[in-house]
Amino acid sequence: MALTNDMIRENLTGKFGEVLYDWEEPYGMLTFSAPKDLNLKVLQHLYDDEVMAFRFLTDLQAVHFPDKKGAELAVVYHLHNLRDNVRIRFKVYTDIQTPDVYSATALFNSANWMERETYDFFGVNFIGHPNLIRVLNVEEMDYFPLRKEFPLEDQTRIDKDDEMFGRGTY
Amino acid sequence: MGEGFMATNFEKVVSLARKNSIWPLPFATSCCGIEFMATMASHYDLARFGSERVGFSPRQCDLLMVMGTIAKKMGPVLKQVYLQMAEPRWVIAVGACASSGGIFDTYSVLQGIDQVIPVDVYVPGCPPRPEAILDGFMKIQELVNAEGLRRRHSDQYKDLLGSYGIQ
């Protein structure tokens, strides 16, 4: 029998109870959130369980929600069950003051570079990552450019007149 | 003096030779590089200007042609390529990105290669047409022709390089 979203939800609720929240199915893709200290337990269960068998980490990234006080950074995992061809999305939220999330590198090797990238752009501190340094940006960069408080444009330059580029103060 | 001879000075002869045998080093990172390929090909034919010999080794080349977006992470690489070229050397920034960062006014892109190396000629355009690249190339030829033998030894030139932290 093919794996359905209802079966996944039932299985996870049976294992973890009501701590998993925000269940939704945008475009048919099951999505839910968990407390951040449970992220590895959930991933491990999804990996080990014979019925679930989510053994491929498609993607891992972060999103910054500046207005969500105490849960500004969301770390998002995309998992794929290759046997039944089912995908799910799973999020944990963390405070931007203490952006510590357990690293999934022990479980998925593909998490290594993706967590480095997430650290590079959002400053999520993945605990247990073997080599958490910048991967795409220059080493000297002293901020995390995809956090919303940093404007897209390079703030150090002086040769472009803001008003001429339509972003001055009027 | 009879037919086939002319009187000139050494400096002019050297300038003439340099001007008509500029070996370009293409540093092409994006679409401007594609326009350069068209410039090299038969229709526009950069060889007409004595530059059919495109070298891919900085040690042999006279003209560094930077074509395309240069990310900040690539800045040191570009500078190293420039340092590996022997004097006299010239630099042409082809296209908006190499000249000023272009549309990529963002945290990861170098806002003009003149932040890391000195530039002789800027070619605007996004990307510039081959005619524009040829025009920029001819401007370089004018510079090469007009440059005296002693310019590279002048204090001004050393100050210029010094401002980029070279030598």
Image (cartoon, rainbow, N blue to C red):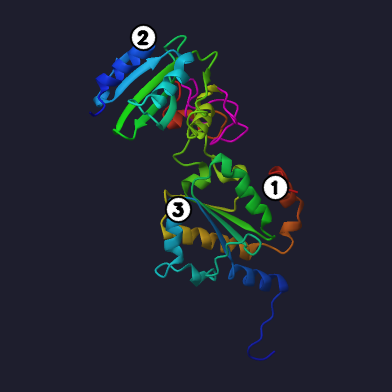
Give the percent coordinates (x, y) of residue A84: 29, 33
Mark 1 or mark 3, whichever is nearer to me: 3
Looking at the figure, which quarter contains the C terminus of chain A?
Answer: top left
Q: Quadrant of the N terminus of chain A?
A: top left
**Residue type for callout 1:** Leu
Q: Residues within 10 Å of mark 3 (few under 14, many from 20)?
A: many
Residue at numbered disc 3: B32
Instruction: State the separation of the CA atoms marked 1 and 2.
Output: 69 Å
Is residue A142 one of those drawn in magenta? yes
Looking at the rendering, the stretch of residues picked out in magenta corresponds to A127-154
Depicted A35 relative to depicted A49: above or below:
above
* Dot 1 crowding, Cα within 10 Å, few <14, some 14–19, many 20+: few
Q: Nearer the viewer, residue A92 or A86?
A: A86
Q: Give the CA distance from mark 1 to mark 3.
A: 27 Å
Q: Determine whether A72 is above or below A107 in the image.
A: above
Q: Which element carries disc 1, helix, strand or loop?
A: helix
Badge 2, how many Cα within 10 Å: few under 14, some, many 20+? few
**Chain bearing mark 2:** A
Main secondary structure type of the part rendered in magenta: loop
Disc 1 marks which residue? B160
Which x, y percent locates residue A77? 41, 26
Whole-number angstrom distance, CA of label 2 to CA of label 3: 58 Å
Mark 1 and mark 2 residues within 8 Å of each other at the beta carbon = no
Q: Amino acid at mark 2?
A: Gly
